[in-house]
Image (cartoon, rainbow, N blue to C red):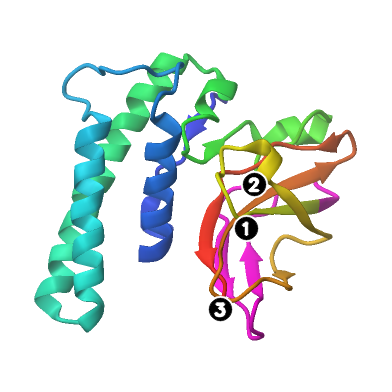
């Protein structure tokens, strides 16, 4: 099975969608594997950023639960989603099935499922979601299970998510369905990333998400 980018953005909450689109834009900015300009009709990063900003403005305006504003938000979200889906197909074509290149795009990556059954490095977890825990300064972390995993490692970052030395070990867990992270400072922004641990060692990190601890 070929390496593919996950484009099921409809599964994300509004906050998760806003974060994920920001990660994609940041990851593709200055990315040597996918240099701009891109051919028409692929939208440029500037156009995608403009579409994201319009969506975020509409999202914040819709917090009043006004039906008209919510409909505007949904329409702008769909327009941004369409741009990102079209871009994903172009990125897959340029990468020519190179999973390492696709992993730099900010999209989640769907890799060959049976690779884990035969050993080797496990793929990055997909479907990660962050939710504030019942206790102040805590987060509940959920992700899709990774076949062949024996546990999971979580790291946090309060600086630049692209700076490897800014990532700090936060927790090791035996399950990915309900990981509870505590000890965070309320009001502080945290980036969170997750990887599976297999019999041959740690796998690939997933694309990080950020949230403000409460």
Lateral position of residue 125 relative to residue 17, left or right? right
At label 2, counting other C-alpha atoms closer than 10 Å, the crowd grade (few under 14, some 14-19, many 20 or more) is many
Q: Quadrant of the rendered structure where residue 183 is?
A: bottom right
* Depicted 94 relative to depicted 11: above or below: above
Lateral position of residue 22 relative to residue 149, left or right? left
Disc 2 target residue: 125
- Which is the main secondary structure of the residues drawn in magenta? loop
Asked whether residue 129 is drawn in magenta, I would say: yes
What secondary structure is found at the residue carrying circle 3? Answer: loop
Disc 1 target residue: 143
Which residue is more in the foreground, 186 or 177? 186
| Label 2 – label 3 distance at C-alpha | 25 Å
| Label 3 – label 1 distance at C-alpha | 21 Å
Asked whether residue 137 is drawn in magenta, I would say: yes
What secondary structure is found at the residue carrying circle 1? Answer: loop
Q: Which region of the structure is painted magenta?
A: 125-151
Identify the residue at horizontal 63%, vertical 31% (top origin): 112
Disc 3 target residue: 214
Is residue 58 visible in the rendered image? The answer is yes
- Cβ–Cβ under 8 Å for marks 1 and 2: yes
Indicate which disc, 1 or 2, sits on the residue closer to the N terminus: 2
| Label 1 – label 2 distance at C-alpha | 7 Å
């Amino acid at each position: 099975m070929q390496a593919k980018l996950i484009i099921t953005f409809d599964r994300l909450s509004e906050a998760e969608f806003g974060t994920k689109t920001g990660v994609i834009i940041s990851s593709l900015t200055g990315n040597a594997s996918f240099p701009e300009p891109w051919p028409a009709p692929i939208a440029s990063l500037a156009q995608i950023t403009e579409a994201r900003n319009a969506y975020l403005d509409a999202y914040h305006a819709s917090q009043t639960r006004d039906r008209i504003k919510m409909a505007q938000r949904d329409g702008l979200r769909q327009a941004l989603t369409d741009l990102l889906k079209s871009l994903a197909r172009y990125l897959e074509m340029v990468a020519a099935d190179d999973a390492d290149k696709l992993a730099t795009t900010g999209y989640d990556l769907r890799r060959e499922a049976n690779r884990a059954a035969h050993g080797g490095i496990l793929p990055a977890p997909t479907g990660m979601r962050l939710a504030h825990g019942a206790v102040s300064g805590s987060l509940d972390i959920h992700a899709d299970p990774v076949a062949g995993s024996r546990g999971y490692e979580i790291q946090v970052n309060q600086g630049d998510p692209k700076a490897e030395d800014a990532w700090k070990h936060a927790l090791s867990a035996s399950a990915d369905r309900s990981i509870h992270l505590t000890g965070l400072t309320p009001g502080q922004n945290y980036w969170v990333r997750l990887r599976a641990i297999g019999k041959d060692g740690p796998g690939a990190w997933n694309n990080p998400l950020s949230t403000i601890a409460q």
